[in-house]
Image: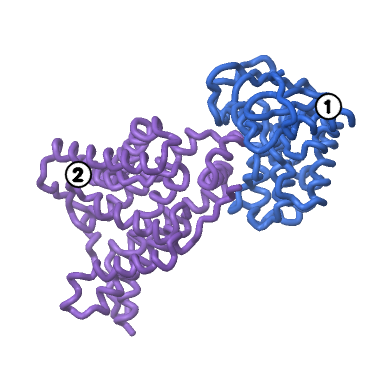
């Protein structure tokens, strides 16, 4: 029983990190049909910002790093994606690849190929034991941050006028504009949220791994992309659901696979994802659109 | 589309009819800035609209009831309705919303349900109410009767007549030529991307138009 609960604790932590990765990708896709592969590089920029501001006090360190990522996200939209507004999703995808590689190589140029180690606040690795369950502070923080961020975004989208406009734009961008919704504000807001969540994810990943390097955004963005696909591209709730299943699935496989097969865990995981997409090509939550 | 010249005067209900692919929707899309205009000009209240964003155009006093209704299926009926007032900053939005729900009782009944659950006719009422929420000085309607049950088609044309008597300036795009000709102050007939001719209301015109509608003879654009 304790073993099972332990596994639930681990799964919750991983799944909430995945949800933080997937939500912004789904949000940006919903609004502008852009699968933003360069979201991973926003995380990387966040990590390097954490490295650069490492000498500051904790609140200033986190705040400035977050600000840098949001600024980077807005700059990315303004320079690379706004000129392509209304282009086909394929064109947008390819340009996001270009942005992604450009930023990776820029980081390589600026910081070199060796990872920059970052000292995280002491105490984050503290471990509690509750009725025999091992809970570390970082996992707890990951879940808390994820719940706060996703809950905050959900309330914003549901309760505020601007949030309703964003949901309308995610469903039918042109129609929203035809009601007077300002396209530029909506897209800028989506990238601001995207940048903020990338910043939070960067903090968690740095706290876990202890370093920043140029290709560190690659795996997170792939996970975000897969989770978003599983949930049904364009559905925010679906993306979170996809992330939760992917996170839980990862931990479950880690537990149930025999030791000899564990190194190929991801092969089983993504095999299962493939199977799911074969059975439900549109994902778990079908984003139905009103098109006549 | 080329050689189109049409105008709508204040308080007028003007029809724009023609077969599928004649360019009716394209005409509306160019007015609201979704389709760029290669040459020529579109003015509203004396101001040119070309080169402005769709949101700026609709904020300037134009509202569109689009083809296929295009309500936001995952948003509630009330959220859809209030989105119509996006460009407004006055304090009367709440009162207008309440008035709309009184005028369209179905919206009151389902105000908290996802709009995607409404039937086609109900969605059409929502689309019209949503457009009216901006208090437009020009209302564009694109095939509001398309795909609706006969009873609902009657209701939509009644509503259009009501709006006309209230003095709403309207450009109505329709495939239902007979009813449009009957209801409108004037009607333009489009074919193959050019204007065929322009009529005023009256039974005689209906036959006249029908002759041309089925391509008996072609005329110079008006």
Is residue B88 visible from the viewing direction of this image?
A: no
Is residue A221 visible from the viewing direction of this image?
A: yes
Q: Foreground: A72 or A176?
A: A176
Q: Quadrant of the N terminus of chain A?
A: bottom left
| Quarter of the figure with residue A232 | bottom left
Q: Colour of chain B?
A: blue
Q: Determine crowd level at label 2: few under 14, some 14-19, many 20+ residues with C-alpha closer than 10 A.
A: many
Subunit bearing disc 1: B
Position of residue A106 in the picture relative to residue A279 (left or right):
left
Q: Which residue is painted at 69% across and 28% down in the image?
A: B190
Position of residue A9 in the picture relative to residue A29 (left or right):
left
Secondary structure at badge 1 equals loop
Q: Foreground: B29 or B198?
A: B198
Kindly identify which residue carries mark 2: A51
Rendering coords of residue A126 (x, y %): 23, 65
Contact between marks 2 and 1 (CB within 8 A): the answer is no
Q: Which residue is painted at 59% across and 50% down in the image?
A: A290
Secondary structure at badge 2 equals helix
Subunit bearing disc 2: A
Outermost residue on the bottom side: it is A1
- In space, the residues marked 2 and 1 are separated at their CA atoms by 71 Å
Q: How many marks?
A: 2
Q: Is residue A80 above or below residue A41?
A: above
Q: Which residue is painted at 28% across and 42% down in the image?
A: A97
Kindly identify which residue carries mark 1: B185
The chain coloured purple carries which letter? A
Outermost residue on the front side: it is B216
Q: Is residue B173 above or below residue A212?
A: above
Q: Is residue A173 above or below residue B39?
A: below
């Amino acid at each position: 029983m304790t073993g099972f609960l332990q596994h639930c604790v681990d799964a919750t932590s991983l799944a909430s990190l995945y949800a933080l990765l997937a939500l912004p990708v789904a949000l940006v896709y919903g609004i502008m049909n852009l699968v933003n592969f360069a979201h991973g590089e926003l995380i990387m920029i966040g990590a390097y910002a954490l490295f650069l501001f490492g000498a500051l006090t904790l609140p200033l360190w986190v705040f400035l790093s977050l600000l840098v990522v949001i600024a980077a996200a807005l700059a990315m939209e303004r320079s690379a994606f706004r000129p392509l507004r209304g282009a086909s999703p394929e064109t947008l995808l390819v340009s996001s690849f270009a942005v992604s590689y450009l930023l990776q190589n820029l980081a390589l140029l600026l910081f070199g190929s060796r990872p920059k180690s970052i000292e995280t606040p002491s105490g984050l690795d503290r471990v509690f034991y509750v009725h025999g369950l091992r809970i570390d502070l970082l996992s707890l923080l990951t879940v808390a941050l994820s719940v706060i961020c996703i809950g905050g975004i959900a309330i914003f989208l549901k309760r505020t006028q601007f949030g309703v406009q964003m949901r309308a734009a995610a469903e039918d961008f042109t129609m929203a504009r035809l009601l007077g919704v300002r396209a530029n504000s909506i897209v800028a807001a989506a990238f601001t949220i995207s940048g903020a969540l990338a910043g939070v994810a960067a903090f968690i990943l740095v706290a876990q791994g202890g370093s920043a390097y140029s290709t560190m955004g690659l795996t997170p963005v792939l996970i975000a992309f897969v989770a978003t696909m599983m949930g049904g591209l364009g559905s925010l709730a679906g993306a979170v659901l996809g992330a939760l299943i992917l996170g839980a699935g990862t931990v479950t496989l880690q537990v149930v696979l025999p030791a000899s097969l564990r190194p190929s865990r991801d092969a089983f995981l993504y095999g299962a994802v493939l199977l799911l997409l074969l059975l439900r090509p549109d994902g778990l939550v079908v984003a139905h659109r009103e098109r006549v | 589309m080329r050689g189109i010249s049409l105008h709508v005067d204040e308080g007028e209900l003007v029809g724009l009819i023609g077969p599928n692919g004649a360019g009716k929707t394209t005409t509306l899309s160019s007015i609201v800035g979704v389709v760029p205009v290669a040459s020529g000009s579109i003015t509203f209240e004396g101001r040119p609209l070309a080169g402005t964003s769709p949101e700026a155009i609709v904020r300037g006093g134009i509202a569109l009831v689009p083809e296929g209704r295009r309500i936001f299926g995952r948003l509630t009926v009330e959220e859809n309705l209030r989105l119509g007032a996006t460009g407004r900053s006055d304090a009367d939005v709440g009162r207008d919303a309440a008035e709309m729900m009184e005028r369209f009782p179905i919206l009151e009944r389902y105000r908290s349900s996802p709009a995607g659950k409404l039937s086609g006719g109900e969605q059409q009422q929502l689309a019209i109410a949503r457009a009216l929420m901006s208090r437009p000085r020009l209302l564009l309607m694109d095939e509001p009767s398309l795909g609706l049950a006969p009873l609902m088609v009657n209701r939509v044309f009644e509503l259009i007549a009501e709006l006309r008597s209230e003095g709403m300036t309207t450009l109505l795009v329709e495939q239902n030529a007979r009813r449009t000709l009957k209801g409108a102050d004037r009607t333009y007939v489009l074919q193959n991307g050019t204007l065929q001719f322009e009529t005023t209301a009256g039974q005689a015109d209906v036959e006249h138009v029908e002759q041309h509608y089925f391509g008996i003879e072609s005329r110079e654009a008006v």
